[in-house]
Amino acid sequence: MKFLAFCQASLLFAISAIAAENPSPSPAGTPAVEARPSAAPKEHLATELKGGSVLRVNSTNQSYDFFRPWSKKAPSNRRGLGAVIDGGEVLVTAELVWDSNFIELEKPDTGERATAKVAVVDYETNLALLKPNNPDFLKELQPLDTSVAPKVGDHLSVVQLESNGTPVSTEALLTSAEVGHYVLDDYSYLLFKMSCPLQYRDNSFTLPIVQDHHLISMLLRYDPRSQTIEAISTPVIQHFLKEADHQPYQGFPSFGLSFSTTRDPQFRHYEKLSDSEGGIYVDDVEPDSPAAQADIQTGDILLSIGGKSVDPDGDYDDSQYGRLSITHFITTLSYTGQKVPVTLLRHGERKDVVVSLFHKPPQDYAIDPYVIGRPPRYLILGGLVFEELSRQYLREWGPSWQREAPQRFVYFDHYQADLFPKERKIVFLSQILPNNDTIGYPQLNYMAVERVNGQPIYRLEDLAKAMEKPINGFHKIEFDLDPKVMYLDAAKVQENAAALQKTYSLPAMRRF
Amino acid sequence: MIRSTFFGIACLVATNAVAGAVADTPKFDVHKSIVRITTTAQEPDYRVPWNPGSISTGIGAGFVIDGNRILTNAHVVSNGRFISVQRENDPRQYSGQVKFIAHDCDLAIVTVSDPNFFKTMHPLNFGPLPTIQSVVDVYGYPIGGERLSVTQGIVSRIDFESYSHSGADSHLAVQIDAAINPGNSGGPVLQNGKVVGIAFQGYSGDVAQNVGFMIPTPVIQRFLADIESGHYNRYVDLSIVPESLTNAAARQALGLPDDDTGVLVSSVESDACAAGKLEPGDVLLSIDGHRIISDQTVELDGENVDLAEVIERKLKGDKVKIDLLRNHQPLSVEVELEPNNSYLIQANIFDEYPRFVTFGGLVFQPLSRNLLEAFQIEDLRVRYFYNNFINEEIFKDHPQVILLSNILPDPVNAYLSEFRYQIVEQINGHKIRTLADVANAFDETSDFYTIKFVGASRPAVLQRSAVEEAKERIKDNYGVRLERNLGEETLR
């Protein structure tokens, strides 16, 4: 168990590091099991935490099986540490409590336990707040302050617990702060990198990182080979906690655009950009995004955002951390609901626009970037299993899903903004449960549905509706790939539904 | 032949499975029919397309047929720069020339100009498709040896197989349990003194043992008939995707009787010969008078074979008559058959120098199987264009998919590395459909050259002055022998 928690963390490191820079992962950084530091780590009793600001958090998680969307996978346990903060809540990483069925808090000194539930969760920044079901449980504990952000070069303490409950802290040097990949693909925020010789201990899936009495950071992953920590940065935690004060929780905002750098002098001459000006080139603007609503267009050169001038690499001068990607300013230093002024160049003319920020939830994408904490949707018709395409489904192919998963779907996912500009989902045939209605059909899968009974299918609800109107007693299902048409006898499908459900022990024939 | 991809040298396994079985072969001297072919080949390097390529030598077999011709495998003589032919028991080596080569069915005709060569040679005749379980003799030069080797095998299976030489074709092939090894390629497989096949591929030892494949006579005869026109025209193809009609509901929905007849047309390639004649949704009932069975087979010579076999035996310009139902109405159409071109993007290219255009250190090349393998390109869009070239009709906008395949680093292109493996859409506003379009666009005089890639908004920009300044520098640094090859430089 001890090692497992750590292996998992370092494995995640390998995966994510690749996903961030290379769409085709190759095995790198295999988790080293016995990566004991050669020099004795600078450890000491974490006396500053004696009042009990850190709790053990045990979570039993059970995620859905996207290949069999009617059932869940085997449950697994994750054990980490949480930080007690103001308001009777415990801060942990969201990953610790992904798809959790049962959460237990444990006081390290007394071993007293209490059940808890997730009060607020943000999978994109990987943060969650837990609330004990008994509000008195945290009464005696000293909450950690979260108002102080460290500087690069500061010495921080990573908190762990001995098996007897004694807090131990290991010194970590904050070596850099830069925007980087967190846990989910495509979600990047300010990341702290630290160097730290960390030992294996129980409950280490995530660990709080403190400076004096201030909670600074939560550990995302540890690479035992290079002895480096990647951790959630203070500004992200501060933003999360501030946002969590309002209900409903609105999430971190984004502009909804992608940009290129403008460093290339030949490109600058072509665009008639002066050498003194910075600016980034707008590649694509998502429809209906904050940027689109502010009339930012492809080809615009963004010169300044929120009063911060943007250099040709897309960086601005941050008062705390120096040169940082402007995305940090937009997603983390700004909040949903805020209006951000933007100065841009369009066809050589200066233009000022105001972007009203909001967060785009995963459900609003054609292909959900993640489906966590909610079950996958499906519909079974005559043994044909239909689902809506999501990256969670593709991730079922494992760490190298980008290579292993059906390439057509990986392509759909990667280029979804270009391919599916209007609001819709991709309904697809995930498998066929063979039965009398499908005799004679080959084993088909991974084909997107275009029409059913003549009706275009943009989501599972459309399919349910189209099913009600068979053509001359037959369901006609049209796909994007060969075989482009399949027929089912509507009356027989209905007649055989109960038997099919029984044969394959399906709890339900659909879930929306 | 060492380049035969299915072969590993390690797969030398003695074939004793047929010990005791003796083929009913009349006595005749097969040594007077078989030749040993040594080919010195030059394989182009798609990563350095201006280089002439690496030189390798391989050995295969061949045999004499009527008309003073030698029949062998295409892969024995592909990319050949020099071919030498030897007879058994003759110390002399004769220079051979490739007369016809068919990469889609891995067959070639080689001739020897020395008139004395064929004088003592004995041409072999062809026999029929052998029956399952019958015994055949396999001749050749496995693992290279100087002397002719013979082994025996049993015909195990007759079916459509993928032909590994082109990598994109499937034809009828006969599986035998004799070990077929590198060097056997091109050798005759005999039964009753007649050629029933040509040994051409096998598996490496770690995949399967005692499995060898030969090209059967229907494929050979078709090749010989095709070249009678003086030119090899390739296989013809209807270029449609048929689907079985074996599901009861599908048959009822289409109003078909329960008689196991007919297949449904799922797709018709819009630039191929059946376009305008056949339509998606048509139910094909018979082909050249043969009833089409609902699982996509027809009965030919008393056996159920794939529907495609009817087309396989035809030549370019031949017609095929198809009876069908369209919207429940019977209809009869005649299609003049043509070779399919779009699938060639997925077929190995031989006997030509790689095509490319360089400009400012940027190398542009058309997407091909060779290119994809040379660079091991993993780019999602490139792979998508390659795999869906036909079914997504990518050929309509991109008859050639032009990639920025490589960047020879130089100050002129210092900021362009992110564009590598992108697909070119426009140059200076000109739509890029072929490599020639790229060359023409760069030949125009312009202060700036803007290259727009598929799916990317920001163009790559090259300033003419910078390109001109870099030209000689890049040429010298990287040894760029040739700035472009648009296909003028071919081998045959």
Image (tube, coloured by chain):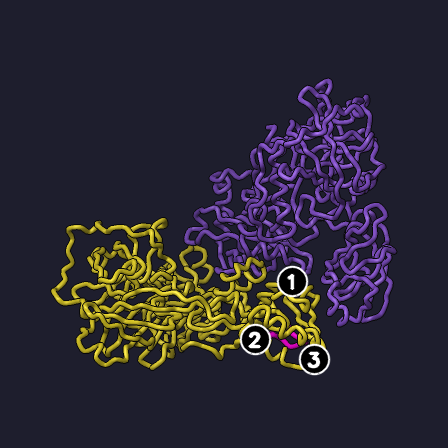
Chain colours: A purple, B yellow
Q: Position of residue B132 (x, y in %)?
A: 23, 57
Kindly report the distance in space between the C-alpha atoms of the residues bearing marks 1 and 3. Answer: 23 Å
Q: CA distance from mark 2 to mark 1?
A: 20 Å
Which residue carries the number 1 mark? B417
| Quarter location, residue A123 | top right
Q: Disc 3 versus disc 2: distance between alpha carbons?
A: 19 Å
Residue at the left extreme of this rendering? B27
Determine whether the residue tagged by mark 1 lies in a helix, strand or loop.
helix
SS at mark 2? loop
Task: Identify the residue at horizontal 22%, vertical 68% (top origin).
Answer: B34
The residue beneath circle 2 is: B483
Magenta region: B426-436
Q: What's the residue at 34%, 67% (across, down)?
A: B76
Label at residue A352 = none
Sequence-wise, which precedes: disc 3 or disc 2? 3
- Percent x, y for residue A244? 80, 39
Name the residue tied to disc 3.
B446
Which label lies toward us, 3 or 2? 2
Up/down of A334 relative to B443, above or below: above
Question: Can residue B83 be spotted in the picture?
Answer: yes
Q: Nearer the viewer, mark 2 or mark 1?
A: 2
Residue B88 in the image: above or below residue B151 = below
